[in-house]
């Protein structure tokens, strides 16, 4: 278990180091000129992202004394949106992550309104933020074959780098953190109150403009 | 439960290096000249003078002889600040350091940050915090306004500055305090900071007279600095505070209307219609720009503000409602707007606050040559709402014992208000004569689904009628009746419900300020 966790942490730290260095990398490049709001080439103002991520999730109860574990799983995401100007994209993001627990399975779908901001228009570095809802389906095998469904407030922050940001097809690497304010979560031992889940993800996606 | 060893020393060192490199990256941004072009306009034809200026600037950015020097200084217009993303991010970090030092001076234990606390906060992620209502609903939005205005003061657009506010808020939550990053603070600081920030930024530009010179000019700049300290300090440092220029075109409102009211109010409960003791208050209402018409893609070119001092609390109401987008429909007969709202109400009977986004439809009709009728309806989403509440079985909020261990301003709970998202809707009708309202009807409903605190659905309703009698000149007298109703639907086995209502009546003198 520890080996898995340490590997995950190393991946995490490396990705965050890259992210942390991004401003410096951006400055080390040639100065941009004024941009048109229209992307270069045949690219349109509509953008799509489809990709996958490796995610770590930890649900925590603020009023409990239990030490809840970090759980790891893969996730997929899709974005659709509109480039409002060379520095700003707005859109909707769908992020889906199934995760096995000791008691069953939890599937979470985040639907967030997101804004993506590129401080330097011609470079790939971007910051991302948004909020929306998360839909949680929680199977507790010992209690029921049906899932316990609940809705949660979802907040996302993150950043990343897009390669070929103005081209029709690009690639992005990202690191994000989702907060999942759930309220109560059903477990085999009973209902856990005041649960907030935190999900850290690193991943990649194809960008189509 | 697994007890996972999660902090190998090597990883911790890497994390420290990572944080150092983050700060280094930001400081590098500030140290270097960014050589960025001013932001180009959005798609479509330029709709405002500011858009046209930005477009002109972008088109001619590679300076040729004979062009004004402000283009080379990366200003979008002569009176605009020079654009620098790096400086904005660096100043946001400075704002964080400033607040951190201020908390240290106040003796707050939460200000004793170290790389170890940073790492602990990153490991934990977001939580709900236990701070006082005023700290979370007023203090954090005000702090967010400072972050936002580091962007505005350095030539960034509204939306770019919004991203800077989110950057400042998240870095504060993770690295500015020892307690874990608070989700409610992040939302309130970012969204409240955007609303208050743009309102203060534009209000400060109303105070400045960029054509004036001498001490009168200086005092105006100082007054503007009191409203928007970040832009003000930047202007003094850059020498813009004494330069004679035109004002940025998009900082000049198409219209401006403000009024003040001073009077007394009586508030009641369901037990007694009105309390015996009157409470004095002072209220300021302002409408910036013309929210009723026009195609607009310039955020906050029209907004409304209400501030009430006294009346049950030192600041009992603050409300900012800014237009993000305006679009006339049906040949201008109907106006559609997208609005951002910041709300705060706190008095001796109830406390509520929210950050929300609404779509609104407005319709105006001239009933005669002097009398006009306007109706506005809206509905939307509340990203995060707060409402004071009691757990079932309690009838009174227990007094929190001051332990003194956390230092001034640090609350260790429990917290007697709930947080959650929700929805809102409302309608207002205004009858005016000679452009002066004489009757206003207002209704607003808000639903908050509590995710933290007492598990319940809250439904809040507020109705208000203002009757105003114009007297001589700008002066008038008025009476307002208000009714606040809150229903709480607990999610307990018995589906318990509570209902509180607070009628209110106000008598006041009013005067028009513009």
Image (cartoon, rainbow, N blue to C red):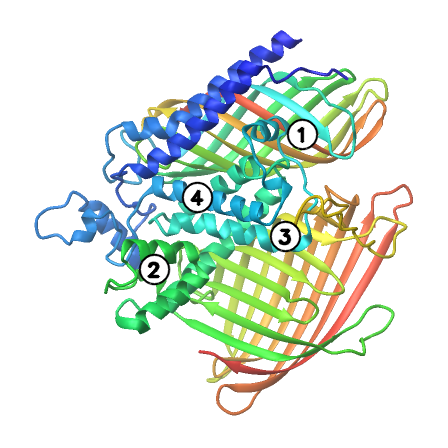
Q: Position of residue B228 (x, y in %)?
A: 43, 59
| Label 2 to label 4: alpha-carbon separation | 28 Å
Within 10 Å of disc 2 (Cα), the crowding (few <14, some 14-19, many 20+) is some
In the picture, residue B348 is in which quadrant? bottom right
Work out whether disc 2 and disc 4 sit on a shared chain.
yes
Answer with left or right where residue A105 lies relative to residue A122: right
Label 2 marks which chain's residue? Answer: B
In the picture, residue B21 is in which quadrant? top left
Near-viewer residue (A54 or B213):
B213
Q: Quadrant of the N terminus of chain B?
A: top right
Of the two numbered discs 4 and 3 on the same chain, state the one appearing first in sequence: 4
Question: Which residue is disc 1 drawn over?
Answer: A197
Kindly state the secondary structure of the residue where label 3 is placed: helix
Q: Position of residue B400 (x, y in %)?
A: 78, 51
Q: Position of residue B354 (x, y in %)?
A: 63, 53
Work out whether disc 4 and disc 3 sit on a shared chain.
yes
> Marks 4 and 1: which is nearer the front?
4
Within 10 Å of disc 1 (Cα), the crowding (few <14, some 14-19, many 20+) is many
Question: Which residue is disc 3 drawn over?
Answer: B135
């Amino acid at each position: 278990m520890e080996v898995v966790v340490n590997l995950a942490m190393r991946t995490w730290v490396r990705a965050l180091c890259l992210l942390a260095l991004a401003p410096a990398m951006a400055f080390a490049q040639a100065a941009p000129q004024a941009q048109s709001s229209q992307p270069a080439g045949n690219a349109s103002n509509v953008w799509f992202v489809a990709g996958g991520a490796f995610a770590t999730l930890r649900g925590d109860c603020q009023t409990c004394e239990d030490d809840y574990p970090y759980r790891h799983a893969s996730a997929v995401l899709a974005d659709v949106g509109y480039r409002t100007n060379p520095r700003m994209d707005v859109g909707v993001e769908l992020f889906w992550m199934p995760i096995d627990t000791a008691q069953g399975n939890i599937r979470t779908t985040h639907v967030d309104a997101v804004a993506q901001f590129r401080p330097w228009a011609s470079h790939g570095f971007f910051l991302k933020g948004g909020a929306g809802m998360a839909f949680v389906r929680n199977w507790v095998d010992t209690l029921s074959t049906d899932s316990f469904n609940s809705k949660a407030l979802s907040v996302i922050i993150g950043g990343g780098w897009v390669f070929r940001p103005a081209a029709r097809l690009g690639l992005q690497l990202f690191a994000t953190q989702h907060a999942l304010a759930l309220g109560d979560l059903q477990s085999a031992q009973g209902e856990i109150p005041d649960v907030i889940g935190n999900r850290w993800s690193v991943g990649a996606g194809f960008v189509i403009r | 439960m697994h007890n996972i060893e999660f902090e190998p020393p090597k990883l911790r060192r890497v994390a420290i290096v990572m944080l150092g490199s983050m700060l280094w990256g930001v400081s590098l941004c500030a140290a270097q000249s960014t050589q960025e072009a001013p932001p180009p306009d959005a798609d479509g034809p330029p709709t405002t003078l500011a858009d046209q200026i930005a477009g002109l600037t972008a088109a001619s950015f590679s300076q040729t002889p004979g062009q004004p020097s402000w283009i080379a200084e990366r200003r979008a217009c002569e009176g605009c600040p020079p654009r620098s993303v790096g400086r904005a991010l660096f100043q946001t970090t400075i704002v964080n350091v400033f607040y951190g030092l201020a908390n240290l001076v106040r003796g707050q234990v939460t200000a004793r940050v170290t790389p170890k606390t940073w790492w602990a906060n990153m490991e934990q992620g977001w939580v709900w915090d236990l701070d006082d209502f005023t700290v979370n609903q007023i203090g954090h939005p005000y702090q967010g306004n400072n972050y936002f205005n580091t962007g505005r003061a350095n030539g960034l657009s509204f939306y770019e500055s919004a991203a800077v506010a989110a950057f400042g808020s998240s870095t504060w939550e993770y690295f500015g305090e020892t307690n874990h990053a608070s989700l409610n603070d992040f939302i309130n600081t970012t969204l409240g900071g955007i609303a208050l920030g743009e309102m203060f930024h534009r209000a400060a530009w109303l105070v400045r007279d960029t054509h004036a010179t001498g001490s009168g000019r200086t005092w105006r700049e100082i007054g503007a600095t009191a409203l928007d300290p970040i832009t003000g300090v930047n202007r003094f440092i850059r020498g813009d505070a004494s330069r004679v220029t035109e004002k940025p075109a998009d900082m000049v409102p198409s219209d401006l209307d403000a009024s003040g009211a001073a009077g007394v109010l009586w508030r009641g409960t369901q037990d007694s219609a009105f309390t015996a003791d009157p409470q004095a208050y002072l209220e300021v209402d302002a409408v910036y720009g013309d929210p009723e018409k026009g195609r607009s893609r310039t955020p906050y070119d029209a907004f409304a503000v209400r501030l009430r001092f006294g009346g049950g609390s030192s600041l009992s109401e603050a409300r900012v409602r800014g237009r993000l987008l305006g679009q006339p429909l049906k040949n201008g007969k109907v106006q559609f707007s997208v609005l951002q709202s910041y709300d705060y109400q706190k008095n001796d009977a109830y406390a509520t606050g929210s950050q929300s986004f609404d779509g609104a439809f407005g319709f105006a009709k001239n009933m005669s040559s002097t009398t006009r009728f306007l109706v506005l309806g809206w509905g939307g989403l509340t990203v995060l709402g707060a409402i004071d509440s009691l757990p079932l079985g309690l009838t009174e909020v227990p007094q929190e014992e001051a332990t003194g261990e956390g230092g001034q301003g640090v609350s260790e709970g429990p917290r007697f208000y709930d947080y959650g998202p929700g929805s809102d809707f409302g309608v207002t009708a205004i009858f005016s004569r000679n452009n002066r309202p004489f009757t206003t009807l207002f209704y607003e409903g808000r639903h908050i689904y509590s995710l933290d605190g007492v598990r319940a659905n809250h439904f809040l309703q507020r109705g208000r009628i203002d009757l105003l009698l114009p007297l001589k000149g700008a002066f008038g007298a008025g009476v307002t009746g208000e009714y606040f109703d809150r229903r709480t639907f607990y999610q307990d086995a018995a589906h318990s419900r509570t209902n509180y209502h607070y009628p209110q009546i106000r008598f006041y003198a009013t005067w028009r300020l513009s």
